[in-house]
Amino acid sequence: MFAQALDRAAVELAADVRDGLSKFPQRELHSKYLYDDIGSALFEVITLLPEYGLTRADERLLRKHAGSILRRLPSPTIVAELGSGSGRKTRWILEALAKRDLTRYYPIDVSAAALHACRNELGKMDSVHITEIEASYTNGLKRVAARRRPGECLLVLFLGSTIGNFERKPGAEFLRQVRDLLAPGDALLLGTDLVKPIPQLLAAYDDPIGATAAFNLNLLARLNRELDADFNLRNFRHEARYNHAERRIEMHLRSEIPQTVHIPGADHEVELRQGETIWTESSHKFDLDEVQRMARDSGFVCEDQWVDSEWPFAENLFRA
Ligand SMILES: C[S@@+](CC[C@H](N)C(=O)[O-])C[C@H]1O[C@@H](n2cnc3c(N)ncnc32)[C@H](O)[C@@H]1O
């Protein structure tokens, strides 16, 4: 069973790499593949960088408002988290909940390393029972929805502005899918990074010690490890750009020379021109009205929004 799941994941990776690198004129690799064991560890480093204020803002809001968020939800409430990562910030929500209920927490992530870190971070909390779910967001949420007991309220967390990794239209469709898996009265707590000055954003995604560059380049190293590819990482450079029209940061990997890369595990070969880029991640930025519209368009009601005073970031409580 486990070996079959591993095989399926390898087949999916190979197919996605083939498709993404065949795209013209802009080649792509899906951002979910940034998070293998090394990528997840590098992401944790990024969250500590002085230039990356996003995680600290998210955490300040959760610490300050966890009590009032949970007072709006009935007992018993269980928690599922989409793309939990290490779950470090989630402690504030779980602690507030554990004061009144014995609760269950389901971190959902494609990265086994992230789930392992999450158990280390939160596994010893009193009154919280953790079940890790290694799956994509909606597959994981379906599994949680199937396990809920009558009368339980489900609180879904989608923190860190990970919604910003979706293009706006697929992001709206994704929120609709989440809504369809919930029951009336359930809630979604959505973290959204807000539009802010471009130099501040560029610094957050292209830090001077090169942690974000390493995170981005590790995607090619992953393809070398898992698909036996021959990317020479020294021939690529990390690039963060702001796309004004789409209000998003884009991360790319720029080919510094003309080169041919072989990827036997995907039965593929790619020729890259000098200066051509592979697009690896987008981080869309939002404003508060837009988030309220996103709630309405996906069948939620936006009940409240809390904004950090140091780094423009909002925690939004959506009700199903
Ligand atoms: C930007 S990190 C955010 C981590 C954490 N929630 C935070 O706020 O710091 C995104 C997380 O989502 C996971 N992830 C990315 N794409 C995913 C997908 N399609 N399904 C499930 N997890 C995914 C990654 O492994 C990573 O742990």
Image (cartoon, rainbow, N blue to C red):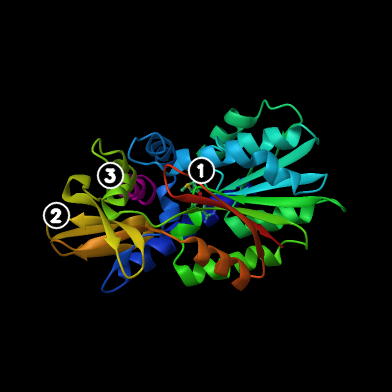
Q: Is residue 232 left or right of residue 159?
A: left
Q: Which residues are magenta?
A: 218-227
Dominant SS in magenta: helix
Earlier in the chain: of badge 2 and badge 3, it is 3
Q: Is residue 251 left or right of residue 6?
A: left
Q: Are marks 1 and 2 in contact (CB under 8 Å)?
A: no
Q: Label 3: which residue? A: 213
Q: Nearer the viewer, residue 302 or 143?
A: 302
Residue type highlighted by circle 2: Glu
Front position among marks 2 and 3: 3
Q: Label 2: which residue? A: 256
Front position among marks 1 and 2: 1
- Callout 1 environment at 10 Å: few (<14), some (14 to 19), or many (20+)? many
Earlier in the chain: of badge 1 and badge 2, it is 1
Regarding residue 141, the answer to whether it shows in the image is yes
Element under label 3? helix
Residue type highlighted by circle 3: Ala
Q: Are marks 2 and 3 in contact (CB under 8 Å)?
A: no
Q: Is residue 41 left or right of residue 89?
A: left
Which numbered disc covers residue 58?
1
